[in-house]
Image (cartoon, rainbow, N blue to C red):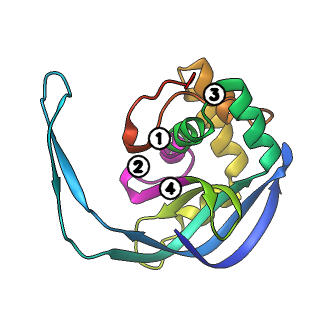
Amino acid sequence: MTIEEDITTKPLATREDVTVHFADVTRRKQVTGFQRRDHRTGEIISEESLDLPETTLETRALYLTLPPGLEGLMQTMSGSFEGGLHAVQHALVAAFPLVILCDRRDVGSVSTTDHPQTETSALFIYDGYLGGVGLARNGYDQIEDLLQHTWDCSPSVAVRTAVRPVSSHPTAVGRTNRWINASQ
């Protein structure tokens, strides 16, 4: 995710060291391969490489940047900051339509523990349409409600703790949506 220009920023009302941004962004994606899996066990049968071109989407996003101190706290509490950030990403996107009138598939999301432009961890929720259609802007304007709904709807105590505006504790969900061992 490339940040083209921050349009506006604000501190999160309940945690001022977390910054909420609204920006023009470019989402780049390239599929490089796939896995064949046994549908009963999930076991990988084979892995195939693909040579496909990169696709881009110029759109708008809301994103949160997290301070290094919070990252360290989450790492100490759970053993996996990356897994916790990824779990929060999915929880926020799942709750997004409860606050902003849209379909869950109208937005995309990306999280990273080391974004090169922010020089810290970042979590992005972006409009899935060229130029944006106002969903990310509405999410930016209603970020506190979005976080509260995510908290209220989460069945997992660990996810609930991760998205609670006053503190953070991640769950054990990792990249490529695989479960990871939080103790590793």
Given residues 129 and 170, the one toward you in this image is 170
Sequence order check, earlier mark of 4 and 2: 2
Are the residues tagged 2 and 1 within 8 Å (C-beta)? yes
Residue 82 image label: none
Q: Residues within 10 Å of mark 4 (few under 14, many from 20)?
A: some
Q: Amino acid at mark 4?
A: Val
Q: Residues within 10 Å of mark 2 (few under 14, many from 20)?
A: some
> Whole-Å distance between the Cαs marked 2 and 3?
30 Å
Given residues 158 and 180, the one toward you in this image is 180
Examine the rendered structure and indicate whether residue 172 appears above or below residue 50: above
Instruction: State the residue position of label 3.
Output: 79
What residue span does the magenta drawing correspond to?
93-111
Instruction: State the residue position of label 1.
Output: 94
Examine the rendered structure and indicate whether residue 107 appears above or below residue 91: below
Residue drawn where x is 44% and y is 43% of the image:
175
> Whole-Å distance between the Cαs marked 3 and 4?
21 Å
Q: Secondary structure at mark 3?
A: loop
